[in-house]
Amino acid sequence: MSVTVERAVCATPSTQRSLLPVVGSGTQVPLVDGTSRVYANLDYAASAPALDAVAARVTEVLPLYASVHRGAGYLSQVSTALYEASRQTIARFVGARPEDVAIITRNTTDSLNLLARIVPTGPDGSPGRVLVLDLEHHANLLPWVQGSGHRTTILPIGPTVAATLQSLAAELSAWQYTLVAVTGASNVTGEGLPVADVVALAHTAGARVVVDGAQLVPHRGFSLTATDADYVAFSGHKTYAPFGAGALVGRRDWLDDGTPYLAGGGAVRDVRTDRTLWQPAPARHEAGSPNVIGAIALAEACAVLAALPDGALAAHELALRTRLVAGLEGIAGVEVLRIWPDSTEPVGVVTFTVEGHDPGLVAAYLAAEHGIGVRDGRFCAHPLLVRLGAPGGAIRASVGVGTPGEAVDRLLIALADYLTTGPLARYVVEDGCWVVADDTRPLIPVHGLDGLAATAAACGPTVEAASGSCRPRRAAHTAA
């Protein structure tokens, strides 16, 4: 199929700077033509880079790291104080009410699985009812349907935001639900329902609301107090603190009474051979040695983001997103995916398809020939991709505080080049993923890649070892 560019892309290059400095912003990556370029990271929706301030904070506190909560040593007391202060900072960042509690988890998935275990039964002792929409990320879908002792309804979304809210209201009036689980912003399109409206509908019907804040919290901010939502879950690795911590913040009663998420030390008051007395939250759900450094890193990211001038974060992403969408819509054959025509204020996540071209091939080309990192596949939101008419996957570009306008321009120019000139390299499918055939790009000299380099040298540029390719491959499950 012949595809042409309908109008010039990026005739005037963007001069927009990043909002905050991030680690790795100047990293050079090799290209197939033998040159290198600064990496254009447009994959923030998957994992965002660390803020410079977060990396500096981790370096500062590492010498002070020790056991927490039960250590008599001076550094143990310091680490405990830092850990608990971080919990408070994280709670404030999402507008927690005074009576709310913050549980330090691994990520959003961990947080939602924790909450799924403690949904109480109905007044008559029957399993609690949970309502979710069919646009959810698997992290906010699978925990509710995998037999956690409650009944779950997956409600199809409507053709508009207004119609979806009407459908939600009708469903809530028809059944007595215990909990509504809803995304704050889609990881596919950046769109979301107005959270305060969802909360009002649910509370009127006697149900609580948990917000999957993985994409919303780092990009727009969120407040439990302002929205009256009951719980919010989010991840450090999407909030510029990729050190393995996330959080579940919300009402204390379920968390105090629910079955502990993990059984182990720190979660108990007293243990005998015939019974166990559990701690209240948060300790009840933080068995084992906690991720002290991860919590401190997440708290630092929260503090830095909270200190930005009002509206600065939204304005930065809006400018990038507007430029990106306008540029994509100006390329014939490219379709930007949207959930609803009446949605407002989407975050900086844009997903698109290129008619007649495999998403994995386009993504591999962007990386190998332009040094651009995007995501391809179905983004752990398979039902939504089917609904949007892209069951085979799409391409996602996502931005954040460290994204300069130049990165968006590079993507648009690269797509135009792909559709007019075509790839320079030859691409093949290996293990279900598109890769450069006979890839000769050098490995970045970093400890841990020695084995790959040695294998490449032994095999030669065009030969594969018996155990696999001489070049590092993308994981075969990327399409998920």
Image (cartoon, rainbow, N blue to C red):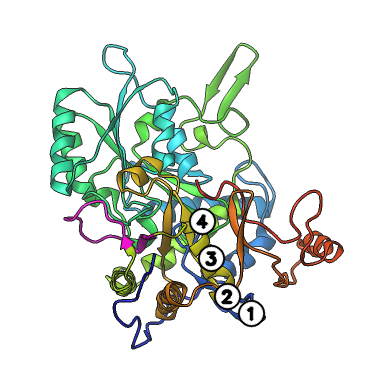
Q: Which residue is mark 1?
A: 33
Between the residue at mark 1 and the residue at mark 3, the CA separation in whole angstroms equals 30 Å
Point out residue 101 in the picture as x, y percentages from the top left corner.
40, 41
Residue where numbered disc 4 is placed: 237
x, y percent for residue 256: 42, 30
Q: CA distance from mark 1 to mark 2?
A: 8 Å
Label 1 or label 4, whichever lies nearer to me, is 1
Dot in front, 2 or 3: 2
Provide the residue designation for mark 3.
50
Q: Earlier in the sequence, mark 1 or mark 3?
A: 1
Check residue 338 for magenta coloring: yes
Residue type indicated by callout 4: His
> What is the magenta segment's predominant secondary structure?
loop
In three-dimensional space, the C-alpha distance between marks 4 and 3, rounded to whole angstroms, equals 8 Å
Q: Earlier in the sequence, mark 1 or mark 2?
A: 1
Q: Is residue 155 visible?
A: yes
In this rendering, the label closer to the viewer, 1 or 2:
2
Please give the label number shown on residue 424.
2
Among numbered discs 1 and 4, the one appearing first in the sequence: 1
Task: Mark 2: give few (<14), some (14-19) or many (20+) Cα within 10 Å.
Answer: few
322 is higher (above) or lower (below) than 177: below
Q: Could you tell me the amino acid type at mark 2?
A: Leu
Q: Dot 1, crowdedness within 10 Å: few (<14), some or many (≥20)?
A: few
Residue 141 or residue 73, whichever sits in front:
141
- Asked if the residue under mark 2 is in contact with the one under mark 1, i.e. CB atoms within 8 Å, the reply is yes
Categorize mark 4 by other alpha carbons within 10 Å: few (<14), some (14-19), many (20+).
many
- The secondary structure type at the circle numbered 3 is loop
Which one is nearer the viewer's eye here, 119 or 449? 449
Span highlighted in magenta in the image: 335-355
Foreground pick, 310 / 98 = 310
The answer for how far apart the CA atoms under marks 2 and 3 are is 33 Å
Determine the image quadrant of residue 420.
bottom left
